[in-house]
Each structure stands twice: as structure tokens, then as C-alpha cells.
Amino acid sequence: MRKLVALLAFGSLFGLFAVLAIPVGAAPPPPPPPPCNPVSNGNGSATCTVHMQNQTMTGPVSPNVCPDGSVVPGGLLTTTVANGVFHLTINKAGDAWATGTIEGTFVFVADGTGVMYTGHFAQWFGDSVNNQNQVHHATINFVGSSGDGSRISLHLEFHFNTDASGGVHFFMMTHC
């Protein structure tokens, strides 16, 4: 159970950067999540809730192309999680459901121009895994401004699933 919670929490925080297309290995891994002490529900299933605060990650991000053709530049992104909560349920068959929400502040320094944006970010993810299929999805939002008055707004959607016949389905959308 602890390994699964650690994997899901790590995946959520690392997913924040992975969805923004950081080259593999470019950013240090996030700090480990707090321990999960599962609580039995008496029917062979167990649940666990983990709270996180004051977790900071910094790493380079690649540019994101918006649907209108404009580009959110690449640069260096630092996020600080003010509040995060992760919830995991595993039933007696080993099926697992997890969800998490994190929110906090960010500082983004754009490549080339050096313009610094500060603002708020929020991320939600959900996972569902059983012996025949799996679904993983997330949304991430960034809204901020710079000292010169320019604004940045980015919404990312991510979905990945496999079905019982082994099919893989994936999409990622960017909204600016």
C-alpha cells in the first residue's frame, strides 16, 4: 500500500512537470510523500489519505503551443505546493482508485526574455486500476502575471487509458 501511495503521489507531482514536457532527468525528483497508514474498511478493502504542504520543485519546461498558434515560452518553473491531498482506496481484489488535488504558487522565468511571472497553480488527478484496464487523467492550471503587466494563463488536460483488449488511448490538450 505504501509503495502504491508513494508512486501515485510522486506521479502527481512529477506529472506537473512531465505534462509540461520537461526532458527526462532534467528536474530532480520531488521529495517523498508523507507515509500512508491504510485504514481497513472491514470488508477486505482499505483507504488512505495523505496531506502535503510546502513541497517545492524547480525544473526547465518546454514551450507549449496554444490552439490559436501562440506559444507559452519555455523557461524555468518553480512550484510550491501550499496544500495537497491524496486519497487512495484498494479493494480486496487489488483494484485501486486514487485522486489528488494540489494547489500553490509558481514562479516562471521565460527563456530568452527573462520575464518573470508569478501566480497560482492548481492540479487535479485521478487514477483507476484493475486487472483488465486502467485510466489516468489530470488537469493543471496556471494563472499569473509579470511586473510589466503581461499575463500568462495555461490549462492542460491529460488522459491515458488501456482497455481490456490491450488498446492504449491517450490525449493531451492545451488551452491558453
Image (cartoon, helix red, strand yellow):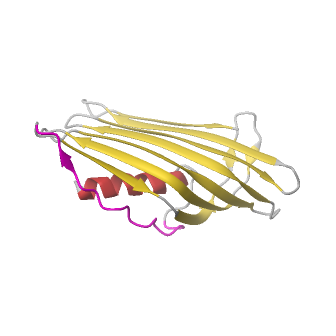
Image spot of residue 151 (x, y percent): 80, 46
State the residue at coordinates (38%, 61%).
Answer: 33
Q: Residue 43 magenta-drawn? A: no
Q: Quadrant of the C terminus?
A: top right
Q: Name the residue nearer the viewer: 110 or 93.
A: 93
- Is 128 above or below relative to 58? above
Nearest the camera: 142 or 133? Answer: 142
Q: In this view, does 2 lie to the left or right of 63?
A: left
Q: Residue furthest bottom?
A: 28
Quick check: 114 left or right of 163?
right
- The image shows residue 121 at horizontal and vertical percentages of 61, 48
Q: Which residue is pictured at 65% across the width and 57% down the height?
A: 106
Q: Residue drawn 22% across and 51% down?
A: 38
In terms of secondary structure, what is the magenta stretch mainly? loop
**Rendered view: 175 above or below 18:** above
**How many numbered circles does the render carry?**
0
Q: Nearer the viewer, residue 126 or 51?
A: 51
The region drawn magenta spans 25-42
* Residue 10 x, y percent position in the rendering: 40, 57
| Nearer the observer, 128 or 86 | 86
Residue drawn at (73%, 53%) of the image: 73
From this viewpoint, which residue is outermost toward the right?
A: 148
Describe residue 1's horizontal placement relative to residue 123 as left or right.
left
Quarter of image, res 126: top left
Q: Is residue 123 left or right of residue 36?
A: right
Is residue 29 within the magenta segment? yes
Residue 174 lies, in percent from the top left, at 62, 38
Residue 124 to residue 113: above or below: above
